[in-house]
């Protein structure tokens, strides 16, 4: 049977760049796909989520597709998440009617529905609507490695009751090897007589081997992405699949335009975004941990190697098959025992303004004005970690709470003259040992999602960000107000900006917290003033 080659770079790769591909790149990409005889290009997603900025391939409207020059013979597909259909208040059919015109009026010919195991049966009626409206219908069963033989068998039986053209299984956690792949194919084939497809992830470096193994076993639809670009470590590489599938497909394969595009666009983007397998992704595949945990940690400068390994060690026992951003904080298990401390900030802060110094460029730019402000207004000054742009005699204390950061900065803190506020009673012996001889103020900490609580000698915080810790110190100390300097922000599309905005919003909503005002430029959604106005 003929093999159908599908490339989903712009859909799966969009998890790295918010589906914001330059239109000229998309056009060159389509031409390159034509030259290696790809059958279908899955241009992106189609759904209802409009939160945050996303590029055209997050919505892949007919209008956008029609603005492109589609090479003759290249067919276009899009993917829909089953959750968008199941949760739609008006039902699956009306949800689909809002997303799709009849195929005869659309440049899209293939629609794939991505389902987790618990969504699969609920989403199957979508096949009826899509088929009735002229589409080729694919259903993707995700995280197949988590399903038992009985579950897979039952889902295959259920799929047989609907007009599905191709039933895909996806190795979403990248934990399969060729032997497992063969077993799954055999289970599905017992009950499913239609075409089968495979979508592989490369956590353990087995995506290509699993794909070719599936082809040998009779799977007829094969996915790839250029350079493997995709969530986490990515997928089977389209450029490799094009070469390996040549003997199974009697088609031309001119790979030159694709290699040029890789060199000029995808390789620099890969360097910037960092997809591709590594030891961390390998471990996530081995232990069945969702690769987005690794992707998030690798893109977050707060996580050093020891941190990532500690999270993996936690998740392999506690379970990490479904990604939850809040689990990352719990996974680190930094602080032992009930929250406690010995230092009461109110003894030094009560009724004073507190100035918290961050590390943004505005600290250096407005250094003179900030130093004049401190000399004239005498706020209580808390510097975060090892920030050192402001004259040391103007800083009252430093605050730090992240154990890995404390270990990394211990030699620097030894040279800084200010007392250091940290949750000493709750840290490991090796962290405290690194601060022998340092003037320490022990203010305790505990982590609890969406929570700020301020006691005299400890706090409960929603995360382990040092800004959260400093806000708690000021609040426990009965500060009259909290001024921020050097909290410029990371850019509107950076997830860290959203994290800090959520933190500040949660803090401000707590009754009786001091007002928070930034006196240097900031992107965060808080009150602002100017250091020059005081």
Image: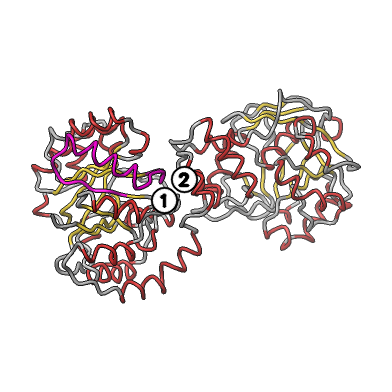
Magenta residues (range): 172-199
Q: Nearer the viewer, residue 477 or 297?
A: 297
Marker disc for residue 292 = 2
Q: Is residue 71 visible?
A: yes
Where does the image place residue 514, in percent across and percent down from the top left? 69, 34
Q: Nearer the viewer, residue 80 or 196?
A: 196
Crowding at mark 2 (Cα within 10 Å: few <14, some 14-19, many 20+) = many
Q: Which residue is mark 1?
A: 231
Where does the image place residue 360, in percent across and percent down from the top left? 67, 56
Q: Nearer the viewer, residue 497 or 294?
A: 294
Question: Is 107 displayed left or right of 323 in the figure?
Answer: left
Marker disc for residue 382 = none
Crowding at mark 1 (Cα within 10 Å: few <14, some 14-19, many 20+) = many
Name which of mark 1 and mark 2 comes first in the sequence.
1
- Tell me: residue 418, above or below residue 464: below
Instruction: Write down the quadrant of residue 116 in the picture.
Output: top left
Q: Secondary structure at mark 1?
A: loop
Q: Secondary structure at mark 2?
A: helix
Q: CA distance from mark 1 to mark 2?
A: 7 Å
Residue at the extreme top of the image, as rendered: 338
Inspect the magenta stretch and tell me whether residue 447 lies in it.
no
> What residue do we see at 57% from left, 35% from top?
314
Where does the image place residue 211, in percent across and percent down from the top left? 30, 53
Where does the image place residue 224, in percent across and percent down from the top left? 31, 57
Inspect the magenta stretch and tell me whether residue 181 lies in it.
yes
Question: Is 375 displayed left or right of 278 in the figure?
Answer: right
> What residue do we see at 41% from left, 67% from top?
266
| C-beta proximity under 8 Å, tags 1 and 2 | yes
- Tell me: residue 334, above or below residue 229: above
Q: Is residue 93 visible?
A: no
């Amino acid at each position: 049977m003929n093999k159908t080659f599908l490339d989903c770079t712009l859909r799966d790769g969009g998890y790295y760049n918010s589906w914001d591909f330059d239109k000229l790149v998309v056009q060159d990409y389509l031409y390159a796909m034509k030259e290696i005889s790809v059958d279908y290009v899955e241009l992106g997603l189609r759904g209802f989520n409009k939160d945050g900025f996303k590029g055209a391939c997050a919505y892949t409207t007919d209008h956008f597709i029609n603005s492109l020059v589609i090479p003759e013979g290249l067919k276009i597909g899009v993917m829909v998440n089953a959750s968008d259909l199941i949760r739609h208040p008006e039902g699956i059919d009306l949800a689909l009617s809002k997303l799709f015109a009849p195929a005869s009026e659309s440049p899209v010919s293939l629609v794939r529905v991505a389902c987790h195991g618990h969504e699969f049966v609920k989403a199957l009626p979508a096949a009826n609507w899509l088929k009735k409206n002229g589409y080729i219908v694919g259903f993707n069963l995700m995280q197949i490695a988590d399903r038992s033989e009985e579950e897979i068998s039952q889902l295959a039986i259920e799929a047989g009751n609907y007009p599905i053209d191709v039933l895909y299984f996806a190795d979403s956690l990248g934990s399969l090897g060729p032997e497992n792949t063969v077993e799954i194919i055999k289970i599905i084939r017992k009950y499913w007589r239609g075409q089968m497809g495979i979508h592989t992830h490369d956590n353990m470096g087995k995506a290509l081997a699993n794909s070719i193994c599936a082809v040998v076993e009779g799977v007829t639809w094969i996915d790839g992405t250029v350079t493997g670009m995709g969530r986490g470590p990515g997928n089977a590489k389209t450029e490799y699949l094009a070469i390996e599938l040549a003997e199974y497909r009697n088609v031309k394969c001119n790979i030159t335009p694709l290699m040029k595009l890789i060199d000029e666009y995808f390789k620099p983007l890969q360097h910037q975004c960092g997809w591709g397998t590594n030891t961390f992704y390998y471990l996530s595949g081995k232990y069945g941990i969702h690769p987005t945990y690794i992707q998030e940690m690798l893109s977050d400068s707060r996580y050093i190697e020891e941190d990532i390994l500690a999270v993996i060690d936690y998740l392999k026992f506690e379970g990490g098959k479904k990604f939850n951003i809040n689990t990352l904080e719990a996974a680190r298990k930094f602080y032992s025992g009930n929250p406690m401390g010995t230092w009461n900030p109110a003894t030094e802060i009560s009724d004073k303004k507190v100035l918290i110094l961050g590390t943004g460029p505005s600290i250096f730019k407005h250094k003179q004005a900030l130093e004049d402000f401190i000399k004239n207004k005498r706020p209580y000054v808390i510097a975060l970690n090892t920030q050192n742009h402001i004259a040391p005699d103007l800083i009252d204390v430093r605050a730090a709470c992240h154990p890995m950061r404390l270990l990394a900065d211990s030699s620097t803190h030894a040279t800084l003259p200010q007392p250091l506020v940290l949750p000493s009673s709750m840290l490991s012996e090796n962290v405290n040992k690194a601060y022998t001889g340092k003037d320490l103020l022990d203010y305790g900490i505990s982590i609890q999602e969406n929570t700020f609580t301020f006691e005299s000698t400890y706090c409960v915080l929603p995360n382990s960000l040092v800004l959260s810790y400093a806000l708690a110190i000021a609040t426990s100390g009965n500060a009259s107000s909290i001024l921020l300097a050097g909290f410029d922000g990371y850019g509107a599309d950076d997830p860290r900006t959203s994290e800090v905005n959520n933190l500040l919003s949660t803090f401000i909503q707590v009754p009786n917290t001091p007002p928070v005002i930034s006196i240097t430029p900031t992107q965060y959604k808080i009150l602002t003033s100017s250091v020059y106005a005081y």
